[in-house]
Image (tube, rainbow, N blue to C red):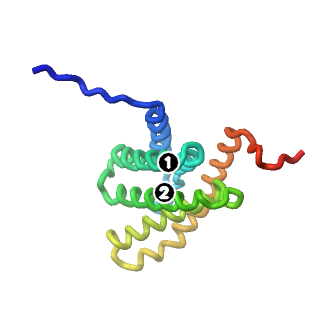
Amino acid sequence: MTRSPIELSTTPDDHRIARLAAAAIALSLVDAAIPLPLPGVKPGLANIVTLLVLYRYGFATAAWVSGLRVVAGGLLLGHFLAPGFFLSLTGAAASLATLALAQRLPRRWFGPVTLSLIAAFAHIGGQLLLARAWLIPHDGVFLLAPLFFAAALFFGIINGLIVARLLGESQPPDPAEPQHA
């Protein structure tokens, strides 16, 4: 009996998702290497890629990139299927679910910075709820909420400004927008 090789055919979209996921994974590794005073407080640099993908390619591609980032990041950092992995997965899922709803809001008032803030708050909110339900079954975990939400506010603004800048540099002006001389 002869064996036939397994062939996978890929599309240009598959290659784009792989490149974008690789960028998000690399930023997750940078995040993990940054020493911060409180465990769980991270800049969320990979969220920059997720927001850029959401704006450029839509929700489905952003969900793929985010999911691949969580799984590959968990494997590379050695916490796949550990509590940190599930916290990351929950935060990413909460963030994506919120972005799915928020991207339908008027772009005039809800741009990259606002969406970044919404995603950051959803991310930490999801993580706190999972921590309360599973890891620390006591309401005392919520005493850390102000600190975590302050970090989400700070890093959400920074990441949103980076996304706005990157989008502004790569997109032609919208013909529907009035031009000012």
Looking at the image, which residue sits at the far bottom? 139
Q: Residues within 10 Å of mark 2 (few under 14, many from 20)?
A: many
Q: Mark 2 or mark 1, which has the lower sequence index?
A: 1
Kind of residue at disc 2: Leu
Circles 2 and 1 in contact, beta carbons < 8 Å:
yes
Could you say where residue 91 lies in the image, as x and y percent from the top left?
Answer: 44, 60
Residue pictured at 59% horizontal, 43% vertical: 56
Kindly indicate the quadrant of the structure image that contains residue 103.
Answer: bottom right
**Closest to the observer: 153 or 14?**
14
| Side (left or right) of 26 relative to 3 | right
Disc 1 residue crowd, few under 14, some 14–19, many 20+, Cα 10 Å: many
Residue toward you, 162 or 36: 162
- What is the x, y in percent for residue 40? 45, 60
Q: Element under label 1? A: helix
Residue at 44%, 35% in the rendered image = 14
Question: What's the residue type where badge 1 is placed?
Answer: Ala
Query: Which residue was labeled with disc 2?
Result: 96
> Residue at left 46%, top 41%?
21
What label sits on residue 62 in the rendered view? 1
In the picture, the quarter occupied by the N terminus is top left
Figure check: 176 above or below 144: above
Q: In which quarter of the image is the C terminus?
A: top right
